[in-house]
Amino acid sequence: MGLQTMIFEQFEQVARDQEKKLARLTPDTVLLDSGLDSLCFAIIVARLEDELGVDPFISAEDVFFPVTLGEFVKFYENAAAA
């Protein structure tokens, strides 16, 4: 399974678990418009850390907050490759 697919599936699962209405997911989806709140994002980051063994928000040298889902995926791709 590709990283983007894994991340999209986590977004969908967390939305179901938290009973949130999720926007249509594309790389251009703005995270703030996704339908998820900060708790949902914290859950996603924790689950991805469990699965991938990396949390790019902790390991990043520069402060960067992805704006779109595509940037979020790229952020994880870069952290996993490091």
Image (cartoon, helix red, strand yellow):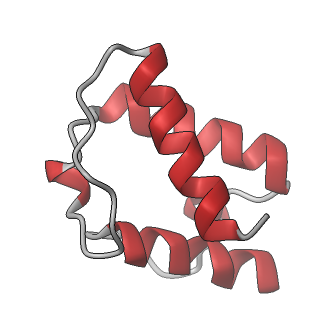
Q: Is residue 62 left or right of residue 2?
A: left
Which residue is at the front of the view, 79 or 8?
8
Q: Which of the 4 image quadrants contains residue 41?
A: top left
* Count of number-bearing discs: 0
Question: Residue at (47%, 38%) from the top-left corner?
Answer: 12
Q: Quadrant of residue 71?
A: bottom left
Is residue 26 visible in the rendered image? The answer is yes
Q: Is residue 82 visible?
A: no
Tell me where residue 20 sits by quadrant. top left
In the rendered image, residue 38, in percent from the top left (x then y), is placed at 32, 34
Taking 27 as reference, is 58 left or right?
A: right
Q: For the C terminus, give its image quadrant.
A: bottom right
> Residue extending furthest left?
33
* Nearest the eye: 5 or 14: 5
Question: Along the horizontal axis of the image, is 13 left or right of 39?
Answer: right
Left or right: 72 with respect to 24? right
**Where is residue 62 drawn, in percent x and y?**
48, 81
Position of the N terminus by quadrant:
bottom right
Check the image and report above or below for 68 versus 49: below
The residue located at (51%, 54%) in the rendering is: 8
Of residue 56 and residue 9, the one placed in the foreground of this image is 9
Residue at x 59% of width, y 68% of height = 4
Is residue 6 depicted above or below 82 in this figure?
above
Image location of residue 10, percent across then percent down: 57, 42
